[in-house]
Amino acid sequence: LLFVVVSSFTVLNMLIGVLCDVVSTVEKQERETMVVNTARERLVGVFKQIDKDGSQNISRDEFEKMGRYEECQEAFRQLQIEPKHLLALADSLFEEDGDEGVPDSSHGQDMFNSYVAGASRQQKNKNLS
């Protein structure tokens, strides 16, 4: 009888431990998603202000201007990305297309979605390590 009680108590404790671990993991993922979505909303606002012609393509100059917006800098801080890295990021985002400095759009991706997706992946990779 004592064995059955101790075994039941042990199994119950293990189940509670698993449940607590699952709840903790889900909470962490939801918090990360909320941070990324908040940063995305801020960046959307800044991109819309910068993209005057509404083409969803931002020139290199417009991208560099983005770094001066406090709202954009705060969004990067939320993603734990230092705003000073924007200029370095511009080199990899912009492949010169003639003299315009417009991103190569032959891949069919609009710049904003690829940029925010990259920032989101960067945030997730930092949390994994």
Image (cartoon, grey):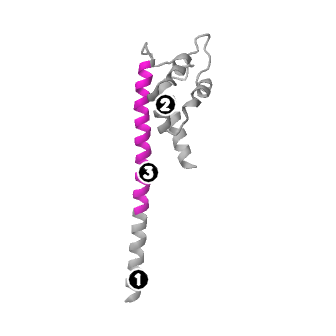
Q: Does 85 appear in magenta?
A: no
Where does label 1 land, which residue?
Answer: 6
Residue at 41% of width from left, 86% of height from top? 3
Q: Residues within 10 Å of mark 1 (few under 14, many from 20)?
A: few
Q: Position of residue 86 (x, y in %)?
A: 57, 28
The secondary structure that dominates the magenta segment is helix
Q: Secondary structure at mark 2?
A: helix
Q: Determine the image quadrant of residue 25.
A: bottom left
Specify whether 38 is left or right of 116: left
Q: Which residue is mark 2?
A: 73
Considering only vertical position in the picture, is 69 above or below 16? Answer: above
Of labels 3 and 2, earlier in sequence is 3
Residue that badge 3 annotates: 28
How crowded pointer 2 is (Cα within 10 Å; few <14, some 14-19, many 20+) is rated as many
Magenta span of residues: 20-49
Amino acid type, mark 2: Gln
Q: Residue at x 53, y 47 (%)?
A: 127
Name the element at disc 3.
helix
